[in-house]
Image: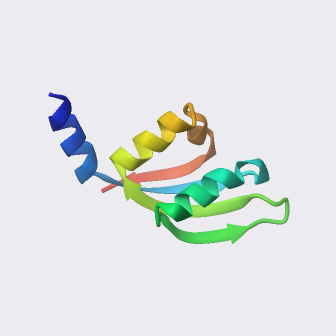
């Protein structure tokens, strides 16, 4: 059952628009390490708008590592 869930999550991909505050720069760096960043825009207040694309499994791991804090930065989300 767990293997089936992992397989399903690895096949689903997400496109997310995130608005990261300056204090979340470590997550920006991590998303670049994963080569997930498609677009980036810096705003006057120092925050960063990112368009990212990654597997649902990768996003689930990041969510777990952030103790679900990344959820707070989601502006929009598309599953494909």
| Residue at x-position 27% and y-position 44% | 9
Q: Is residue 54 left or right of residue 44?
A: left
Q: In which quarter of the image is residue 78?
A: bottom left
Q: Which of 41 and 64 lies nearest the eye of the viewer?
A: 64
Answer above or below: position of 41 versus 6: below
Q: In x, y percent, where is residue 13? A: 33, 55
For the rendered model, the colour scheme is rainbow
Q: In x, y percent, where is residue 63? A: 50, 38
| Residue at x-position 19% and y-position 44% | 7
Q: In which quarter of the image is residue 6?
A: top left
Q: Which quarter of the figure is the N terminus placed in? A: top left
| Residue at x-position 78% and y-position 54% | 22
Report the residue that reaches farthest toward the front. Answer: 33
Q: In x, y percent, where is residue 33? A: 52, 62
Q: Is residue 56 left or right of residue 8?
A: right
Answer above or below: position of 37 versus 54: below
| Residue at x-position 62% and y-position 51% | 27
Report the residue that reaches farthest toward the right. Answer: 45
Q: Which quarter of the figure is the C terminus placed in? A: bottom left
Q: In x, y percent, where is residue 32? A: 55, 64
């Amino acid at each position: 059952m767990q293997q089936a869930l992992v397989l399903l999550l690895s096949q689903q991909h997400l496109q997310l628009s995130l608005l990261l505050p300056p204090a979340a720069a470590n997550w920006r760096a991590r998303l670049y390490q994963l080569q997930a960043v498609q677009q980036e825009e810096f705003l006057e207040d120092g925050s960063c708008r990112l368009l990212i694309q990654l597997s649902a499994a990768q996003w689930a791991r990041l969510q777990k590592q952030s103790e679900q804090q990344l959820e707070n930065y989601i502006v929009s989300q598309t599953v494909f």
